[in-house]
Image (cartoon, rainbow, N blue to C red):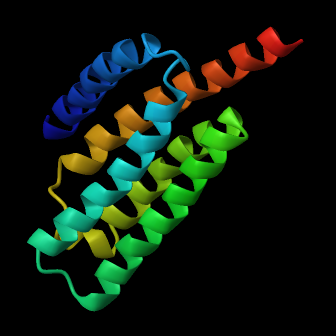
């Protein structure tokens, strides 16, 4: 039941985020990039609060670097890469924080909420990229 609630909360938060981003001059692309970095940073905060070891902190820092790079490249050059960054963040949520090393310091509900949020934002970022391609043609 907690999983279902977390998924629904992720969807509701994503819907609110996407409504806010639609009103932006760049159709939300900048906020999608910033949001991807923030989602990675949240796991660093969980690791710090949960007093995770150096290995886990380094892994989470690597995630910030990885997703921060995807956000930067995606914002600057390719909405498709930005959408891919959001979609791949789901792998980070599930592989690392449900069963992996991060499961010890991440709240049980959070990866599920993040999963639904990430997928909705990935779809929206991809749609923005498709819209940008159409307007350039």
Q: Nearer the viewer, residue 17 or 23?
A: 23
The quadrant in which residue 6 appears is top left
Please state the horizontal and vertical placement of residue 70, each as a whole percent of the image: 59, 53
For residue 32, above or below residue 109:
above
Please state the horizontal and vertical placement of residue 31, each as a whole percent of the image: 43, 32
Q: For the N terminus, which image quadrant? A: top left
Q: Give me the residue at 33% from left, 88% from top.
A: 55
Q: Nearer the viewer, residue 125 or 90?
A: 125
Q: Is residue 14 visible?
A: yes
Q: For the C terminus, which image quadrant? A: top right
Q: Give me the residue at 34% from left, 49% from top.
A: 39
Image side of residue 44 versus residue 27, left or right: left
Please state the horizontal and vertical placement of residue 74, each as a whole percent of the image: 64, 43
Q: Give me the residue at 68% from left, 24% from top.
A: 129
Please state the horizontal and vertical placement of residue 59, each as a whole percent of the image: 40, 77
Image side of residue 132 versus residue 107, left or right: right
Q: Give me the residue at 45% from left, 12% from top.
A: 22
Q: Is residue 98 visible?
A: no
For residue 125, above or below residue 94:
above
């Amino acid at each position: 039941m907690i999983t279902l609630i977390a998924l629904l909360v992720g969807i509701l938060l994503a819907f609110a985020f996407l409504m806010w981003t639609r009103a932006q001059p760049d159709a939300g692309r900048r906020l999608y990039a910033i949001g991807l970095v923030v989602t990675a940073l949240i796991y660093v905060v969980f690791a710090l609060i949960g007093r995770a070891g150096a290995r886990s902190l380094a892994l989470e820092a690597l995630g910030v670097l990885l997703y921060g790079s995807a956000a930067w490249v995606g914002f600057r050059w390719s909405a498709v890469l930005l959408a891919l960054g959001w979609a791949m963040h789901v792998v980070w949520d599930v592989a690392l924080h449900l069963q992996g090393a991060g499961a010890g310091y991440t709240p049980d509900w959070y990866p599920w909420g993040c999963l639904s949020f990430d997928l909705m934002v990935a779809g929206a970022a991809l749609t923005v990229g498709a819209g940008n391609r159409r307007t350039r043609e």
